[in-house]
Amino acid sequence: MKLLPFSSLLLPLVLGIVVLRAEKVDYNGYKVLRLSLGESVADIEAQIEELAAHVLNPGRAERLDVVVAPDNVDAVAALAADSTVLTEDVGAVLEEEGEMTTYAVPSETWFTAYHSYTDHIQFLRDLQGGFTSNSEIITAGSSVQGRALTGIHIWGSGGKGSKPAVLFHGTVHAREWISTMTVEYMAYQLLTKYSSDATVRALVDSYDFYIMPVVNPDGFVYSQTNDRLWRKNRQTVSSSSCVGRDINRNWPYKWEVPGGASTNPCSETYKGVAAGDAPENQGLVAQVNQLRDARGIRLYIDFHSYGQYILWPYGYDCNLRAENDAEMRSLASQAASAISGVSGTRYTIGPACSTLYATTGDSTDYTDVVGNVTYSYTYELRDQGNYGFTLPANQIQPTVRETWAGVVSMLQNA
Ligand code: 0X9
Ligand code: ZN
């Protein structure tokens, strides 16, 4: 009898592990609680982080939204001074989010459903394929697992690379799927309206657009295959079994300042071992520096969800104001009006730290100071917590359309 090689005996075991690993988190029965913490916040926050499956708005200690397994609901509520149930059953909300549909060529119907990562890449390629004379696919380094950070560069009548840059990043945080759709809509509008809409043509003829819908591809894929509420990248740390750095805490500017990020690898806001030690950040830093050194960057927007905020520097210090703070406020205020003019959706605007919470190593502090970007913003898209990250598919089109109006307003005033 031929002996089976050792490896084939192990195979069922290995497969068993793989199957187990690929199992998706089942959020049926999980609740979203909104907590007020009251006194001794830091200590209680740590205990809550241990018990919760996810903290949805890490850093916002006075009003924390957390996802909690049915068995832990009472314990978490008991730790808080006050708690309300935002979502009775996260599993039911995920069903409302809608099915991922099969791929169709670029058209408005793309913006009626969420899509797989491969389909997003195909969408970009097909869109570019329709406008080969004024666009090209670009990359900015690659992820931990080797996926290229992929985007599209769009230019106008001046020719490729002749104008100041406008740079958009989306899906920094894996679970913020509405940001992927929104950033894609910006590219879709600029290309498909260029020949028919004078406003769009003027914008495309004035700037070189660099549009990156998914800058955290590994995290995004993981949010589709394993855990819908995953936030960080998928990088390991030797000192811990927890996975992931927060890409929006890893930029190499004021990374070392305490208070705006976590040094705990298990935290949602883990900053990494060293400034810029996430490969995704390395690619994005190189992109920003290169555009700065070429024609300069006029406008940078980092698209996130949720909360409906337009924020600008600084994140690391609540008392510091950018030298062009008044201009940044003016653009943000006009954008917020444009958004509410479309749909009535209300945005809160202000400097990031004092308006929301402190962050160190975040994108807009880097782009403002090191990238020398004239206008740097973080958009927190819909909603205000009713659905949170799992915004239903029937809100994609209203969201991308109102946001387009805000962005056009910014571009016209920049
Ligand atoms: O925490 C973040 O990175 C952003 N919020 S999110 O819920 N999308 O994770 C906010 C970044 C804005 N900067 C500051 N608030 N300082
Ligand atoms: Zn985010």
Image: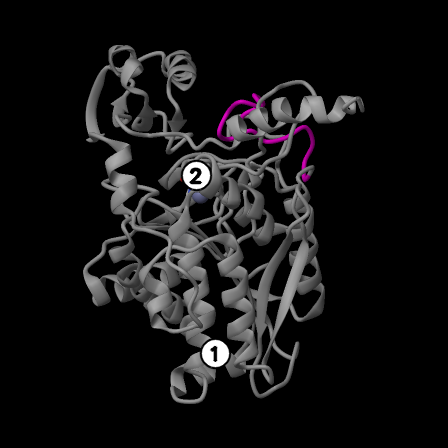
Quadrant of image for the N terminus:
top right
Mark 2 C-beta closer than 8 Å to ligand 1: yes
- The residue shown at (45%, 43%) is 224
Q: Residue 210, relative to residue 72: is it above or below?
A: below
User: In the image, residue 243 lies at what x, y percent?
Assistant: 58, 28
| x and y, in percent, of residue 232 in the image | 53, 36
Badge 2: how crowded within 10 Å, few (<14), some, or many (20+)? many
Between 268 and 372, the residue placed more toward the observer is: 268
Q: At numbered mark 2, what does the secondary structure look like: helix, strand or loop?
A: helix
User: 190 or 260, which lies in front?
Assistant: 190
* Residue position for label 1: 191
**Dot 1, how many residues are within 10 Å of its Cα: few (below 14), some (14-19), or many (20+)?**
many
Q: Is residue 263 magenta?
A: yes
User: Residue 320, relative to residue 394: is it above or below?
Assistant: above
Residue type marked 1: Leu
Q: Residue at x 23, y 61 (%)?
A: 340
Q: Which of the two residues, 112 or 360, is positioned nearer the viewer here?
A: 112
x, y percentage for residue 42? Answer: 41, 16
Question: Which amino acid lies under the numbered mark 2 shown in the image of this protein?
Answer: Cys
Residue 193: image location, x then y, percent: 41, 82
From the viewer's perspective, tell me whether residue 195 is left or right of residue 152. left
Q: Judge from the rendering whether residue 294 lies leftward or rightward of residue 266; answer left or right.
A: right
Q: Residue at x 19, y 60 (%)?
A: 344
Q: How is the image coloured?
A: one colour
The dot on residue 21 is none
Main secondary structure along the magenta-highlighted residues: loop
Magenta span of residues: 261-276
Q: Which residue is mark 2?
A: 353
Marks 2/1: CA distance? 35 Å
| Residue 387 falls inside the magenta stretch | no
